[in-house]
């Protein structure tokens, strides 16, 4: 459960990246595939080129879903339910991949926002993304 201050910090970070969903999302995927090559098995159809349309499209979809989660922090379970079904029952993504994505997400934020991405913002964002991941992986059980 995020405090009021943590929620404000998550929203502040989102305001800085909103509008750049495709490019940030594609960079996030590229970092994930490069740093943790085992994650690439789920995305055989994607390449490694930062301006590849499919990579940008998937990056945009993924970040738009994060944007929806930011707007519905109180209701994550309900808004993310279809995505949770997809990842657990259709895609069967192993839950151990989620912390890897969270780590790469923070590196993308830090590299772009630099000093604007404060220690407190990182802590709040980590907590928020962990909450999103809990919801996306709980239907495995
Ligand atoms: C598809 C979001 C984590 C693998 C998707 C879609 C969204 C999404 C919005 C598209 C759904 C649709 O087309 O209806 C997220 C979010 C995540 C997350 C918000 C975590 C914060 C992961 C992880 C993996 C993964 C960790 C595996 C390493 C996939 C795959 C697809 C997918 C393989 C299908 C891609 C395709 O059809 O082209 N995800 N995802 N996701 N996700 Fe995730």
Image (tube, helix red, strand yellow):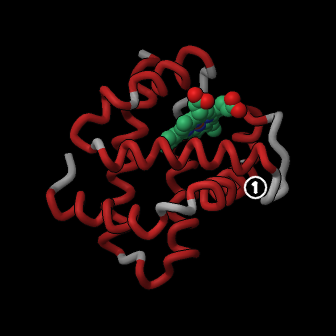
| Residue 28 figure quarter | bottom right
Q: Residue furthest bottom?
A: 115
Picture coordinates of residue 12, whole percent (x, y) = 33, 67
Please identify the residue farthest to the front as the structure is shown: 19
18 with respect to 91 (left or right): left
Left/right placement of residue 43 relative to residue 81 reads right
**Which quarter of the picture shows residue 120?**
bottom left
Location of the N terminus (image quadrant) = top left
Label 1: few (<14), some or many (≥20) within 10 Å? few
User: How far across and down, in percent of the image, does residue 13 sit?
Assistant: 38, 66
Residue at the spot 34% in from the left edge and 49% down from the top edge: 70
Pointer 1 residue: 34
Picture quadrant of ligand 1: top right
At which x and y percent is residue 22?
A: 63, 55
Using the image, determine if residue 135 lies above or below residue 29. above
The structure residue drawn at horizontal position 56% and vertical position 75%, both measured from the top left corner, is: 112
Is residue 97 in sight in this rendering? no
Name the image quarter holding the C terminus.
Answer: top left
Q: Is residue 53 above or below residue 51?
A: above
Q: Is residue 48 above or below residue 41?
A: below
Residue at 16% across, 56% down: 3
Name the element at disc 1. helix
User: Which residue does the image show at 37% across and 43% down from the upper left?
Assistant: 69
Rendering coords of residue 79 (x, y %): 35, 30
């Amino acid at each position: 459960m995020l405090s009021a201050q943590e929620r404000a910090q998550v929203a502040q970070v989102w305001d800085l990246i909103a509008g750049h969903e495709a490019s940030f999302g594609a960079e996030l995927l590229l970092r994930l595939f490069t740093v943790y090559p085992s994650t690439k098995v789920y995305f055989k159809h994607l390449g490694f080129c930062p301006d590849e349309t499919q990579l940008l499209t998937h990056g945009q979809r993924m970040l738009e879903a994060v944007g929806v989660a930011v707007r519905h922090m109180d209701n994550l379970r309900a808004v993310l339910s279809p995505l949770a079904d997809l990842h657990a029952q259709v895609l069967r993504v192993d839950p151990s991949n989620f912390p890897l994505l969270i780590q790469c997400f923070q590196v993308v934020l830090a590299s772009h926002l630099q000093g604007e991405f404060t220690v407190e913002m990182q802590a709040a964002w980590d907590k928020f993304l962990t909450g999103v991941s809990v919801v996306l992986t709980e239907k495995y059980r």
